Every structure is written in C-alpha cells, then in structure tokens.
Amino acid sequence: MNRRYNPFWALILTATLATGSCSPLGIAIGAGASAGIAATEERGIEGTAKDATIRFKISELWLDQGLDFYHALEMQIYEGRVLLSGQVPTQTMADTAVRLAWQPEGVVEVINEIVVRDGDLTAIATDTLAATRLRTELTFTKGVQAINYSIRVVDGTVYLIGVAQDKDELARVIRTARALSGVRDIVSHVWLKDDPRRTGKDGK
C-alpha cells in the first residue's frame, strides 16, 4: 500500500475524525472547513496536514498498547513539535509513550510533560472544563490569534504549544490562563512567530 504523505487526504482524515461523519457530504464539509481554518494558521495548510498525519500515526502506535494506555495520554502537535501530557501509573508507560512519539516521520521534537501517578476522574473532568473555558476566553481576547495555540490542562496545569505573534500576545494568553479558576500552573512551549527554530521557517 502506498502511504506517501498527501496534505489534502490528511486534512480529510482529520475532518472525518473530528466530526465523526463518514458520509461523502460530511467529509466534504469537514475537509473544507478544516482547510479554511488551516489556511489562517501560522503553520498553513501543509503544516496542519503534516501535524495531523503525525497525530494519526502516534495514535495508532498508542492504541496498539491498549485503550487504557491511549486514554491516559494527551498530545499536542505544532510544526512537528509533539507535546505529551497526561497521567500514567508507571514510569515505563511514560517512557513508552515518549519512545513511540518519536517514531513517525516529521517529528522534530518530543516534549515530555507526562505525570506519573494514578489519575482522578473528578480532576480530569475539571481539567477538561478549564481547557474549554480557556479556548473560549482566548477566542474572544483582543490581540490574540487563538487559532495558533494548542491547549491541554492536566491536574490544574495548563500546557501551551503553538506560535505567538509577539511577546505581548503570549503575555495576554498567559494572563488569561492564570485568571481561570482551577488553574494552578502554566507550562508554555510556545515559540514566537519570528523564532528561527521554527521548522522550515526562515524567521522572517
């Protein structure tokens, strides 16, 4: 089977998984919406599609370890940078998650923020709500391009990855996160738009 990377089909796959629709109309609408959103991101359509392909491949590798393994972990991917978070009961699980995350082609960095301890269902629900509130707040915060940020909350810690237009925008994002109830700490792996480390970017 030919598994060569194709940005268009990667976007369709992402749209299908996100909407849960397998009908031709649902796929077309989802893919069109995803392509439109991706075009406005700093990483662009091709970058978004590459990250979607990496996400899919890591998900496959994690699922091979079992559903408990898969559901205990979170991943955020931006321009080939993979940020891992979540709570697992053993260090071996955390090490395995990191090792598998490095395997897909296109991964340039794996950031390990996985916490080794048993999860709390109540805390997980609280974290999910906090992440949803933060996404909503950032969407309506003046001077913040929320689409360029990926957000996860684990045990009250907010994990951020993505691209900020400048230091002022990043400061606004962090201030907004700190103001939310239930947030205990913030870990930012966000790079500035002109950071020369950005994959395939010239820093201009």
Image: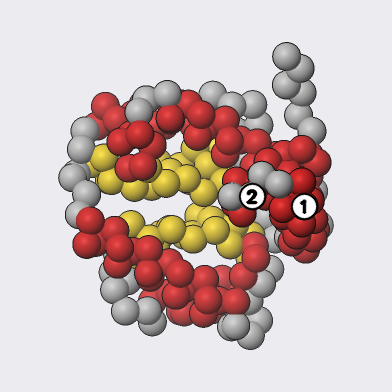
Report whether residue 131 is seen: yes
Q: Residue 172: where, in percent of width, then height?
A: 54, 79
Q: Is residue 65 above or below residue 29?
A: above
172 sits to left or right of 131: right
Q: Nearer the viewer, residue 142 or 30?
A: 30
The residue depicted at 37 percent of the width and 63 percent of the height is 128
User: Could you say which disc has been placed on residue 21 in the image?
Assistant: 2
Q: Residue furthest top?
A: 1
120 sits to left or right of 103: left
Q: Nearer the viewer, residue 28 or 196?
A: 28
The residue depicted at 28 percent of the width and 46 percent of the height is 87
Q: Residue 40: where, in percent of width, then height?
A: 77, 63
The residue depicted at 24 percent of the width and 61 percent of the height is 123
| Numbered disc 1: secondary structure | helix
User: Could you say which disc has been placed on residue 196 in the image?
Assistant: none
The picture quadrant where one finds residue 162 is: bottom right
Q: Residue 72: where, in percent of width, then height?
A: 32, 42
The residue depicted at 51 percent of the width and 79 percent of the height is 137
Q: Residue 151: where, in percent of width, then height?
A: 49, 61
**How far apart, in angstroms, are the residues tagged by discs 1 and 2?**
9 Å
Q: Is residue 145 above or below residue 41?
A: below
Q: Is residue 36 above or below residue 59?
A: below
13 sits to left or right of 28: left
The kind of residue tagged 2 is Ser
Q: Is residue 191 above or below residue 52?
A: below
10 Å crowding of disc 1: few (<14), some (14-19), many (20+) = few
The kind of residue tagged 1 is Leu
Q: Which residue is mark 1?
A: 25
Q: Nearer the viewer, residue 19 or 57?
A: 19
Mark 1 touches mark 2? (CB < 8 Å): yes
